[in-house]
């Protein structure tokens, strides 16, 4: 069949001025793609987001079509995803690969079949709706870090989020296309019920097409599935980095001020809901809270935040522990999108962390009143544990001005952490890069949180804190990191952290604010200003150094008994962990051999230490290094 002229097709969906804007981007493939999907999806009209002037229109549309409700503060809107769509859907999120090649721990699916399935869902899906097309940058503008992306969605809520979270990059498309590689994201909300919730959740699909450098999300609203520039892009970015020899990470980026005002830059990987954002906030300068692209320039590893906003967890944000964030989230003058919080009858936004009790209103599961139970008799929380807020980073008073630096910031240290009640110490430095990548990053485990659908609390393997967004074999990803260091003149130090260690009674041992001390210790280590103690698993702080930091920066005592409890080596737990990790990587065919060497050495050191000191070894037993 003869192909129709894209311009003629698109003319029936948009006015001449829009059409002109679109054709300023000199990329026939883009025009063809948009014409093709518009013909299939049959939206009422198409709206291009090309400048900040379009932002107010998109926000207004989200309110008019009731995807967002306005709270008592006109700048604060609330969106509800519905009880079955409040988190990322692991089961139905698939990486499309030719032939459906099986990759351990990664949910793969045959590319052709996957694309066919998506195509079968799409016809007419945008009928009666407006289709938004946005042009964004994943990274600072005019930067070697940046990946371009086009988002197509029939949700003004999704487009509204993207406008706050990413740098608008229409001008770069005009300037550079077709000589840029850009990702394509297609989101179609699907049928909604009278609440505005997805009707066909069983047909929810989030498919990532590596070869086509694109992703699809259908029959879903939750931001982690639908905001293409966020997690779908992260998966494409991991893939692209693996082909080109750089790193794409699920990491915050922040700066900590050491003596004389120097800044040590730290990046940190954590699974969702394990302290990534709070670590960024306890630093002195925030660059990013969720993702990082890390590349080598002149022998230095440098990191850039692909985002310019935050889609953060709001549950538990309170004035005492998170003063900076709380202030922003309660400021009537800031533009904020809340999702899956409670909107009370008098128009207040409520989440766990507010000091007043929640009053009746609406939440992710419909009308809510204190004590409301679901059909199984379980109490429905007023605000969902994975409830989120979307804001611009520019609202933060401690935002690092280098957030927009096209060259990014230098990486002095990387930290890896998860929810671990009984094994890791609060902070430990790896002996070197390879040891760190293997024992801190590749061996990361964490208890599941509410950020994914399913039961929270179970210990899961989560290498680099990125498993949910991994699009290539884990073995390859480990190798990519081991090789990356070969380009570096200055090697970042690597740390394992754990904020979730519990005592015999099951209580957390550390206070939330203590993480600041661990970060300050990293600054001293990176600058060779303190020694450390050598344990079988890495290098830990000397007691007196921590006492000084606690006193100076938190104005509190750090008792010997706490140090001993926190920094003891729990050998049986470590050995069991090494067994688990060994078994996992045995099943991953392309695991680099060094991983097994280092695990074997670690086990030997742990056993020798146990023979000498027993199962639980006090940190006071160790020698300085
Ligand atoms: C995460 O879950 O890691 C998030 C939120 O940052 S989401 O966009 O759902 O991935
Ligand atoms: Mn995340």
Image (cartoon, grey):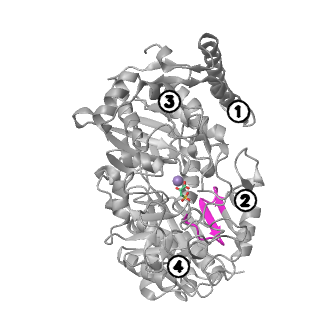
Which portion, as a residue range, is magenta? Answer: 207-223
Labels 1 and 2: the sequence-earlier one: 2
**Distance from the alpha carbon under mark 1 to that under mark 4:** 45 Å
User: As rendered, which of 464 and 68 lies closer to the eye?
Assistant: 68
Picture layout, residue 241 above or below residue 542: below
Numbered circles on residues, count:
4
Give the residue pinned by disc 4: 67
Count neighbours of disc 1 (C-alpha within 10 A) and say few if under 14, some if 14 to 19, many if 20 or more. some
User: The C terminus is located in which quarter?
Assistant: top left
Labels 3 and 2: the sequence-earlier one: 2
Picture layout, residue 185 above or below residue 109: below
User: As rendered, which of 287 and 477 lies closer to the eye?
Assistant: 287
Eye-nearest disc, 3 or 2 = 3
Residue 382 image offset from top left, x and y in percent: 54, 68
Q: Position of 157 compared to 332: left or right? A: right
Q: Quadrant of residue 483 in the image?
A: top right
Give the residue pinned by disc 1: 580
Residue at screen point 60% across, 36% down: 442
**Distance from the alpha carbon under mark 1 to that under mark 3:** 23 Å
Count neighbours of disc 3 (C-alpha within 10 A) and say few if under 14, some if 14 to 19, many if 20 or more. many
Eye-nearest disc, 4 or 3 = 3
Query: Which quadrant of the render holds ligand 1?
Result: bottom right
Do the residues under discs 1 and 4 have CB atoms within 8 angstroms?
no
Give the residue pinned by disc 2: 111
């Amino acid at each position: 069949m003869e192909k129709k002229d894209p311009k003629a097709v698109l003319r029936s969906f948009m006015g001449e001025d829009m059409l002109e804007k679109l054709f300023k981007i000199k990329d026939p493939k883009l025009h063809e793609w948009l014409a093709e999907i518009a013909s299939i999806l049959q939206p009422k009209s198409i709206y291009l987001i090309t400048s900040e002037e379009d932002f107010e229109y998109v926000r207004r549309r989200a309110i008019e079509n009731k995807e967002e409700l306005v709270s008592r503060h006109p700048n604060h809107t609330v969106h509800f995803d519905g009880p079955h769509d409040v988190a990322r859907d692991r089961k139905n999120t698939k990486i499309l690969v030719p032939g459906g090649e099986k990759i351990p721990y990664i949910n793969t699916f045959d590319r052709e079949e996957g694309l066919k399935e998506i195509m079968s869902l799409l016809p007419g899906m945008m009928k009666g709706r407006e289709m938004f097309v946005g042009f964004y940058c994943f990274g600072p503008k005019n930067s070697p870090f940046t990946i371009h992306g086009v988002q197509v969605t029939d949700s003004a809520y999704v487009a509204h989020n993207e406008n706050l979270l990413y740098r608008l990059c229409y001008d770069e498309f005009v300037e550079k296309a077709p000589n840029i590689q850009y990702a394509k994201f297609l989101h179609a909300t699907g049928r909604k019920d009278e609440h505005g919730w997805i009707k066909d959740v069983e047909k929810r699909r989030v498919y990532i097409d590596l070869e086509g450098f694109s992703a699809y999300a259908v029959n879903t609203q939750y931001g982690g599935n639908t905001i293409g520039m966020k997690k779908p892009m992260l998966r494409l970015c991991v893939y692209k980095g693996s082909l080109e020899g750089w790193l794409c990470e699920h990491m915050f980026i922040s700066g900590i001020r050491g003596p004389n005002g120097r800044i040590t830059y730290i990046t940190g990987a954590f699974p969702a809901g394990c302290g990534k954002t709070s670590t960024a906030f306890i630093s002195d300068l925030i660059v990013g809270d969720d993702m990082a692209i890390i590349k080598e320039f002149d022998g230095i590893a440098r990191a850039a935040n692909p985002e310019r906003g935050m889609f953060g967890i709001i549950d538990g944000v309170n004035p005492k522990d998170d003063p900076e964030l709380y202030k922003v989230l309660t400021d009537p003058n800031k533009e904020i999108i809340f999702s899956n919080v409670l909107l009370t009858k008098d128009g207040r936004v409520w989440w766990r962390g507010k000091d007043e009790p929640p009053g009746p209103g609406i939440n992710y599961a419909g009308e809510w009143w204190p004590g409301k139970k679901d059909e199984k008799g379980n109490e429905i929380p007023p605000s969902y544990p994975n409830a989120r807020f979307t804001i611009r980073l520019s609202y933060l008073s401690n935002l690092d001005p280098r957030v927009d630096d096209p060259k990014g910031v230098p990486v002095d240290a990387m930290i890896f952490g998860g929810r671990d009640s009984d094994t890791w110490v609060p902070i430990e430095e790896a002996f070197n890069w390879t040891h760190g990548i293997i024992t801190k990053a590749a061996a990361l485990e964490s208890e599941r949180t509410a950020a994914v659908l399913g039961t929270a609390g179970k210990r899961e393997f989560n290498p680099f804190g990125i498993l949910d967004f991994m699009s290539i074999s884990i073995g390859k990803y480990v190798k990519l990191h081991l090789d990356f260091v070969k380009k570096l003149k200055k090697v970042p130090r690597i740390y394992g952290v754990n904020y979730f260690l519990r005592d015999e009674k099951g209580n957390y041992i550390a206070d939330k604010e203590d993480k600041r001390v661990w970060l300050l210790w990293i600054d001293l280590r990176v600058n060779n200003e303190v020694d450390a103690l050598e344990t079988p698993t890495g290098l830990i702080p000397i007691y007196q150094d921590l006492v000084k930091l606690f006193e100076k920066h938190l104005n509190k005592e750090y008792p010997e008994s706490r140090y001993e409890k926190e920094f003891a080596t729990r050998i049986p737990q470590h050995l069991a962990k090494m067994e688990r990790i060994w078994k996992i990587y045995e099943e991953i065919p392309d695991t680099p051999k060094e991983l097994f060497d280092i695990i074997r050495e670690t086990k030997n050191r742990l056993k020798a230490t146990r023979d000498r000191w027993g199962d639980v070894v006090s940190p006071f037993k160790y020698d300085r290094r």
